[in-house]
Structure formats: structure tokens, C-alpha cells
Amino acid sequence: MIQAILDKLPGWFVFFNASLAFFIPFIIYLINTSLHEKGDPEWKKTNDKKDR
């Protein structure tokens, strides 16, 4: 029973690539957010907070 389930699961390479497909865009999002917090001018920061 368990072996039949394990045979249908994809290999470790598929899980590795799926995790990369999640983590790479997430890390880019975090870097982009921190760059905007540090580099945006004050007028843009106040407009962003007011719109939300």
C-alpha cells in the first residue's frame, strides 16, 4: 500500500525545482520591497500609505 503511493510520487528533482519556483520569486519580492523602502522619495512613500 505505502509502496504504491511512493511509486506515484515524483522524484526529488521535481520537488527541488518546485521549491525553487516558489523561493526565487519570493526572495526577489523581498529584495524589491526593501529597496523601495530605502530608495523611494518621501512623496512617493506618503502617497503609497495614503492609498492603502
Image (cartoon, helix red, strand yellow):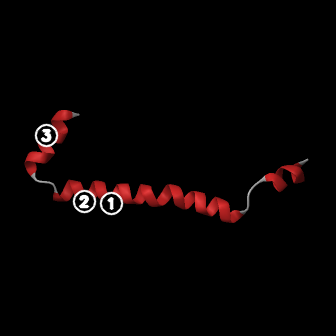
Dot 1 crowding, Cα within 10 Å, few <14, some 14–19, many 20+ = few
| Marks 1/3: CA–CA distance | 21 Å
Res 30 → quadrant: bottom left
- In the rendered structure, which disc, 1 or 3, sits on the residue that comes first in sequence? 1
33 relative to 47 in the view: left or right: right
* Residue 52 versus residue 26 in the image, above or below: above
The type of residue carrying mark 2 is Leu
47 relative to 23 in the view: left or right: left
The type of residue carrying mark 3 is Asn
Question: Would you say the residues marked 1 and 2 are in contact, meaning their CB atoms lie under 8 Å apart?
Answer: yes
Dot 2 crowding, Cα within 10 Å, few <14, some 14–19, many 20+ = few
- In the rendered structure, which disc, 3 or 2, sits on the residue that comes first in sequence? 2
On the image, numbered disc 2 is attached to which residue?
A: 35
Q: Residue at x 65, y 59 (%)?
A: 15
12 relative to 19 in the view: left or right: right
On the image, numbered disc 1 is attached to which residue?
A: 31
Q: Which mark is residue 47?
A: 3
